[in-house]
Image (spheres, rainbow, N blue to C red):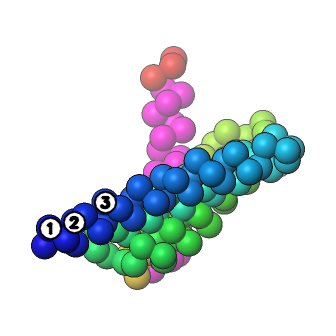
Amino acid sequence: MAYALKLKFASVLVAAGVLVSSSSLVMAASDRTTNIVKKGAVGAGIGAAAGALSGETSILKGAVVGAGAGAAVGATQNSRTFEGRPLARRVVSGAAIGAGTNIVRGKGVVKGAVVGGAAGGAYHWIKNRIRD
């Protein structure tokens, strides 16, 4: 039991090392591309940590799905299409995160995207109401 916990902790540290090294590799790219790659790296680290700590999936699958969801969020945040549309940006980002979460859990991807998109929309609505 203690060995398994040490192994999971070591994998989280490796994922954190990947985050640091990958963010330094993309410094020469454009700002938009750099942000997308950084979000993907952060997603990979979070996915690997979730896979290591939760036991719901493997570390590798968590990292791959996390990288995809993170890159999707980075792409929507840096998209010129969503520049003046914060509600749409948050709904699409939430849908990407929800779909990625349900892929890792082995549940329905569409349901995860719908719930994530609704959460993104709710976040936008609450954030705007608190400001008012």
Q: In which quarter of the image is residue 12?
A: bottom left
Label 3 is placed on what type of residue? Phe
Which residue is the site of mark 3? 9
Specify the principal SS of the magenta part. Answer: helix
Q: Residue 33 location in percent, x, y?
A: 80, 50
Q: Residue 130 location in percent, x, y?
A: 45, 23
Left or right for 74, reference 101:
right
Residue visible at 54% across and 61% down in the picture: 44
Label 1 is placed on what type of residue? Ala
Q: Dots 3 and 2: beta carbons under 8 Å?
A: yes
Left or right for 7, reference 13:
left
Quadrant that contains the N terminus:
bottom left
Q: Which residue lies furthest to the left in this view?
A: 1
Q: Dots 2 and 1: beta carbons under 8 Å?
A: yes
Magenta segment: does it hold 41?
A: no
Q: Magenta span covers which residues?
A: 108-129
- SS for dot 1: helix
- SS for dot 3: helix
Query: Is residue 15 visible to the viewer in this orientation of the structure?
Result: yes
In space, the residues marked 2 and 1 are separated at their CA atoms by: 5 Å
In space, the residues marked 1 and 3 are separated at their CA atoms by: 11 Å
Residue visible at 25% across and 64% down in the picture: 6
Q: Residue 76 location in percent, x, y?
A: 71, 51
Q: Residue 5 carries which label?
A: 2
Label 2 is placed on what type of residue? Leu
- SS for dot 2: helix
Q: Quadrant of residue 54?
A: bottom left
In space, the residues marked 3 and 2 are separated at their CA atoms by: 6 Å
Q: Earlier in the sequence, mark 1 or mark 3?
A: 1
Which residue is the site of mark 1? 2
Work out whether 98 lies above or below 32.
below
Residue visible at 70% across and 54% down in the picture: 37
